[in-house]
Image (spheres, helix red, strand yellow):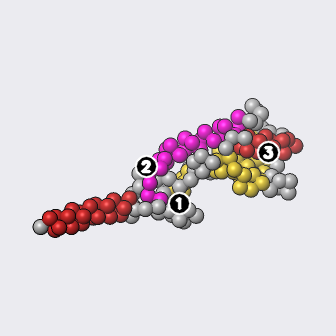
Amino acid sequence: MIWLARLTCGTVLLLVTGCGIVGLGGEGMEETLGKKQAGERVDQHIEDAVAVLPESVRLERRGNLDSASCDDADDNGPNGRVTVSKKYRLRDLPAEENEEHAAALYEHWTGNGYTVLQDSRPDERYIWVEHEEGSFRMALRESSDVLSLTASSPCVWPDGTPHPD
């Protein structure tokens, strides 16, 4: 009888442990920032970057979409998450100073916890970086002598809490 009680207790313990693992869903099912908080962090990355540029810079918002589905994410995580991004043209900066502005942003990023993923200078003005804390990404690109700045979040759950399908 004692042996049976131990077996029953062991079985219950294993069932509870098994349910805990299944309930969490494994990789990618942890809580994240919510969409709103990710947007606030995107804004902060933009503000911090723009602060190293001349005061004359004017941000012109590009696109109306703030978030997009991460259902085909390259992190192999679960569906249902989104990424938050914002893109701006940097206006009122003389085109002949674009390389100086790119260099200033590069110095800002490399001195503040960003890893350079791609730097295509001098062939083209394109720098792509990822912040070491939180995996937020930013890019600077020149097109037709106008610089644009983009910031995006990693994949997050819209309300911060996993909701498996």
Does residue 33 appear to the left or right of 56 in the view shown? left
Q: CA distance from mark 2 to mark 3?
A: 35 Å
Mark 3 belongs to which amino acid? Ala
Q: Residue at x 75, y 52 (%)?
A: 127
Magenta stretch in the rendered image: 28-51
State the SS at label 3. Answer: helix
Of residues 142 and 38, which is closer to you in this image? Answer: 38
State the SS at label 2. Answer: loop
Residue annotated with mark 1: 70
Q: CA distance from mark 3 to mark 1?
A: 29 Å
Q: CA distance from mark 2 to mark 1?
A: 14 Å
Q: Residue at x 77, y 42 (%)?
A: 107
Does residue 21 appear to the left or right of 38 in the view shown? left
Does residue 27 appear to the left or right of 120 in the view shown? left
Residue annotated with mark 3: 102
User: Going from the N terminus, do you reach mark 2 or mark 3 first?
Assistant: 3
User: Going from the N terminus, do you reach mark 3 or mark 1 first?
Assistant: 1
Q: Residue furthest right?
A: 96
Q: Residue at x 77, y 33 (%)?
A: 54
Mark 1 belongs to which amino acid? Cys
Determine if residue 140 is in view: yes
Picture quadrant where residue 117 is located: bottom right
Q: Are marks 3 and 1 in contact (CB under 8 Å)?
A: no
Q: Which percent across, then down, holds residue 161?
A: 41, 51
> In which quadrant will I find the N terminus?
bottom left
Q: Are marks 2 and 3 in contact (CB under 8 Å)?
A: no
In the rendered picture of this protein, how many numbered marks are placed on residues?
A: 3
Determine if residue 158 is in view: no
Mark 2 belongs to which amino acid? Asp
Q: Disc number at residue 159?
A: 2
Q: Which percent across, then down, holds residue 67?
A: 54, 53
Asked whether residue 29 is drawn in magenta, I would say yes
